[in-house]
Amino acid sequence: MYCPKELAGYFLEGNTVKAWKYINEQEKLTLLDTYHAMITPAMQHIGYLWETNEISVADEHLATVTCDYVVSRLAHARLASPEKNNRKAMFLCLEGEQHYIGLKMVNSLFEEMGWDTKYYGANLPVEYILKTAEAWQPAVVGLSVSIVYHLPKLKEYIEELSKLPNPPVVIVGGRLTEKYDLKPYCSENTIILKDLKEMREWLNYEQTKSKQDAAL
Amino acid sequence: MNKQNPNKMQHFNEQLPLPFLKLDKDGTIILYSTLAMEHFDLSEDHIKHIVDNESYEKLLRYSSNDKAPVVRMELNMKSRTSPVTLYEVYLTWDNELHASMILLPKDQSNMQLIEKMMSLQKRLAETDFELYEQREELEQILSRLHELSGPFIPLTDKMCLIPLFGDVTEEKINVISHSCLQSVFAGEYEDVLIDFTAVGNVEDKGIEQFVRLLKTLHVMTGKIIKIIGIKPHTAKTLNKYALEGFMEFNQSLKQVLQTHFTK
């Protein structure tokens, strides 16, 4: 029986070998379900341990890097080589944001659906993203935010992206989406997605829509 | 009293190396050091105004501990430089139910860690997992090869033979040592013969590890270990380790067995 606390324990030890072995001893789920039902609860437990004064931020950093290894390796192991759909998406955390694991999982799920992606990880200033987005012209830009004080920045990123000649669809995710109403910081067209399941549903919907468009 | 603080908050006029605050039981700041003033905006006299909301809940819940006189916790504080700044807080209560707090800024010390994390993150993003897995597989095969390069052969109830094959490397002797010591221990063997006839190159580190194995085997069996078929060059290297009393050289397995059985 899978236990998020056990996986969290291996992450905190920095033990990539045990963490990888533990995941592989469990029932083999799809990439989405492994991320959603195994990795996410384990990382949420680590957040809980900080809140309850059991671990330090330094411990959290070690756990994050260990988790990153597992997430990356899972993407390789469970990602079937998808049919390319010729759509592009890029992913980044706002400047100052260090919580990048969720974003990385989202990136893999897009790849799984045949998207061409660019993943920038933690802490990317808005100027960088504007430059790349203008040149590469992604259809989607995924932003991750987990600190309340960064919400005004979220607004700035979205506004700046909307001014591009080919404005991308902006998707916002991260732990704040569950706790707060982010609409005031977004534009009308911004998509706010609470978790990986919602992300997949949106992707499925997009896929169907683009197929219908192509058939017309 | 400071002009900025019209409340009952007082300035603690000592040069302390870290920000210091004293609170009453309701969380009102009653005393602050100069550094506390420099780090935080103390225009409001309640602690909640300088602690991040989520961290404030943590502070309320964990600020008293019956078991420890000093509580240590990390809190995100609203400092003058940033609305979320990590501090390590040391807190203790006195008889009047006042809490003294020393606050140690943590962001700087974590910076190195974050940089390390970023470089690892980058490396992971560039890792070709196909190559990575192939390497892992190769390592397993190599370890299996090492195991097979030093098989354990029981000759009689008390005598066993370990013929070594190929080059003597540190990794190989490590792998062989593990299985060999286990077998000698489990079978209570007394005479251990190690045959070097099929050995190719000998690495210094490999020999070092081999000497360790010899000494351990000697302690376990209480007898001299018999080395067979060793080349002059390797014998010379081994002799540097002053192993008299631990091992002896023998020409061939045939010779050792003949001596043993004619005893």
Image (cartoon, helix red, strand yellow):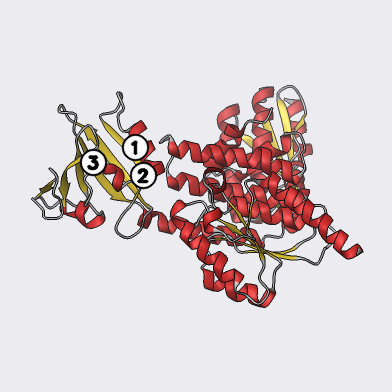
Mark sitting earlier along the chain (3/1): 1
The amino acid beneath tag 1 is Leu
B79 displayed left or right of B112: left
**Residue B101 - label:** 3
Crowding at dot 3, Cα within 10 Å, few <14 / some 14-19 / many 20+, comes out as: many
**Horizontal and vertical percent for residue A206?**
78, 56
**Disc 3 on helix, strand or loop?**
strand
Determine whether label 2 and label 1 are within 8 Å by CB.
yes
* Residue sticking out furthest to the right: A215
* Closer-to-camera residue (B187/B117): B117
Q: Distance between the Cα atoms at labels 3 and 1?
A: 11 Å
Relative to A28, does residue A117 appear above or below in the rendering? below
Q: Chain of mark 2?
A: B
**Disc 1 on helix, strand or loop?**
helix
**Horizontal and vertical percent for residue B86?**
37, 50
- Residue underneath mark 1: B59
**Disc 2 on helix, strand or loop?**
strand
**Residue B75 - label:** 2
**Horizontal and vertical percent for residue B68?**
29, 28
The amino acid beneath tag 2 is Leu
On the rendered image, what quadrant is the N terminus of chain A found in?
top right
Q: Distance between the Cα atoms at labels 2 and 3?
A: 12 Å
**Horizontal and vertical percent for residue A132?**
62, 74
